């Protein structure tokens, strides 16, 4: 979702057009894939090692993305080196959606963190009815009206629309490394935007492939997960930001969306300020009347939201309310209809 803080300037690297690839260094390429949403693209990267290429993320599953990949694979660097690995940073469809098909095309193994892989397997194999039940249970607690709940039942499993099938994967974890021709890429796994998101960094060259955890123009969506127990995802994200706040501003960040930039610490500080401001907005509103997730959405996102945006906005509003509960600033009580109400402690 958009942030009310000044974004960092673009690094002096030309962005590729949709479905195109540009070289960043002798061993790093940047691909931009289109998305059919308001956030209309995702950034993918390609790294070169002695044995061949590693693709970082894949785009959603669609006929258009399939054609983009067919065109890319027929040109350098893919005609110069074999594709050995596909590393998926996290389970969201714009990052994993085409991974199974791409692994079949290239013969490459897929690398993921265990938690993110299992999350994708769970969601792709859910029936429409089971997925709808999960969504309705959560949305009812959020305070959505019956019309929206009925739409969810009709919609079914919207995750599998853009993913279709989760590939088998070899699990990697924080502390592992990935070889490159210019050194080692170090793996970190963080919670916040997703539950065990992979980031890669080269400390010698000070290059950070941040995925969706550090973006220049928008704030990453910080939402409580639909499947599984509720967790303080905003608290985890604050911990991540506190860590990279110490890095300094001389790193080159290659993010999952928008443009390459520097200023890691400055951006982290701005995102902390942004989320703290949103928490204060909710506390001020809760002083006037107890909040539901839907009324918190009106505070945080005072705009017309489509179905796709409602999903992210509701999860983010819930994450902020739940963080305030964990901080003992709010209480949460459930009424006879299953709707959660948040009030000052």
Image (spheres, helix red, strand yellow):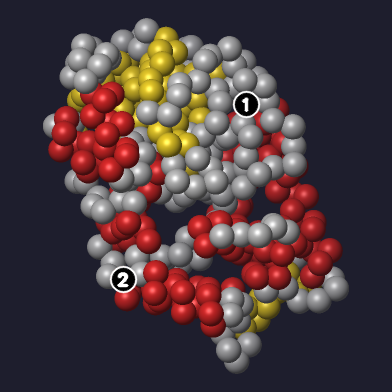
Tell me, yes or no, if residue 326 can be seen here.
no
Eye-nearest disc, 1 or 2: 2
**Up-down relation of residue 116 to residue 205 (above or below):** below
Instruction: Measure the C-alpha gap from mark 1 to mark 2.
Output: 41 Å
Q: Secondary structure at mark 2?
A: helix
Please name whichever residue, 62 or 341, is drawn nearer the observer in this view of the structure. Answer: 62
- Horizontal and vertical percent for residue 141? 56, 77
Q: Is the residue under label 2 in contact with that under label 1 (CB below 8 Å)?
A: no
Q: In the figure, residue 6 lies in which quadrant? A: top right
Splitting the image into 4 quarters, where does residue 215 fall?
Answer: top right
Residue 80 on image: x %, y %: 21, 11
Q: Is residue 116 left or right of residue 143?
A: left
The residue sitting at 62% across, 31% down in the picture is 216
Q: Quadrant of residue 246?
A: top right
Badge 2 density bin: few <14, some 14–19, many ≥20, Cα 10 Å: some
Give the image location of residue 120, x and y in percent. 32, 54
Label 1 sits on residue: 264
Badge 1, how many Cα within 10 Å: few under 14, some, many 20+? many
In this rendering, the count of numbered labels is 2
Measuring 79% from the left and 63% from the top, which residue is drawn there? 283
Q: Position of residue 299 (x, y in %)?
A: 75, 62
Task: Label 1: state its secondary structure.
Answer: helix
- The one of 78 and 185 positioned closer to us in this rendering: 78
Residue drawn at the location 59% of the way across and 76% of the way down: 144
Q: Pick the quarter of the image with the C terminus.
A: bottom right
Residue 207 horizontal side relative to residue 344, left or right: left
Q: Which residue is mark 2?
A: 128
Q: Nearer the viewer, residue 180 or 56?
A: 56
Query: Does 46 sit above or below residue 337?
Result: above
Residue lying furthest bottom: 336
In percent of the image, x 66 and y 60: which residue is there? 304
């Amino acid at each position: 979702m958009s942030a009310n803080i000044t974004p960092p300037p673009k690094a002096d690297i030309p962005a590729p057009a949709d479905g195109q690839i540009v070289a960043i260094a002798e061993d790093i390429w940047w691909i931009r894939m289109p998305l059919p949403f308001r956030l209309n693209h995702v950034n993918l990267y390609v790294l070169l090692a002695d044995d061949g290429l590693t693709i970082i993320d894949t785009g959603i599953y669609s006929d258009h993305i399939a054609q983009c990949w067919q065109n890319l694979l027929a040109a350098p660097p893919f005609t110069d080196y074999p594709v050995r690995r596909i590393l998926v940073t996290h389970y969201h469809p714009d990052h994993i959606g085409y991974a199974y098909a791409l692994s079949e095309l290239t013969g490459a193994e897929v690398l993921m963190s265990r938690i993110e892989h299992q999350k994708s397997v769970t969601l792709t194999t859910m029936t429409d009815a089971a997925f709808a039940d999960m969504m309705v249970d959560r949305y009812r607690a959020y305070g959505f009206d019956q019309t929206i709940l009925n739409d969810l039942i009709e919609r079914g499993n919207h995750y599998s629309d853009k993913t279709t099938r989760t590939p088998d994967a070899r699990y990697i974890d924080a502390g592992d490394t990935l070889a490159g021709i210019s050194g080692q890429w170090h793996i970190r796994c963080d919670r916040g935007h997703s539950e065990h998101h992979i980031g890669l960094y080269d400390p010698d060259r000070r290059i950070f492939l941040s995925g969706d955890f550090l973006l220049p123009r928008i704030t990453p969506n910080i939402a409580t997960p639909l499947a599984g127990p509720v967790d303080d995802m905003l608290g985890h994200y604050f911990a991540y930001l506190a860590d990279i706040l110490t890095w300094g501003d001389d790193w080159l960040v290659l993010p999952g969306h928008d443009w390459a930039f520097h200023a890691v610490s400055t951006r982290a500080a701005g995102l902390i300020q942004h989320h703290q401001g949103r928490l204060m907005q909710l506390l001020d509103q809760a002083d006037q009347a107890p909040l539901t997730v839907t009324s918190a959405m009106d505070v945080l996102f005072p705009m017309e939201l489509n179905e796709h945006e409602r999903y992210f906005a509701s999860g983010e509003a819930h994450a902020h309310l739940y963080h305030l509960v964990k901080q003992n600033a709010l209480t949460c009580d459930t009424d006879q209809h299953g709707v959660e109400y948040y009030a000052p402690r």
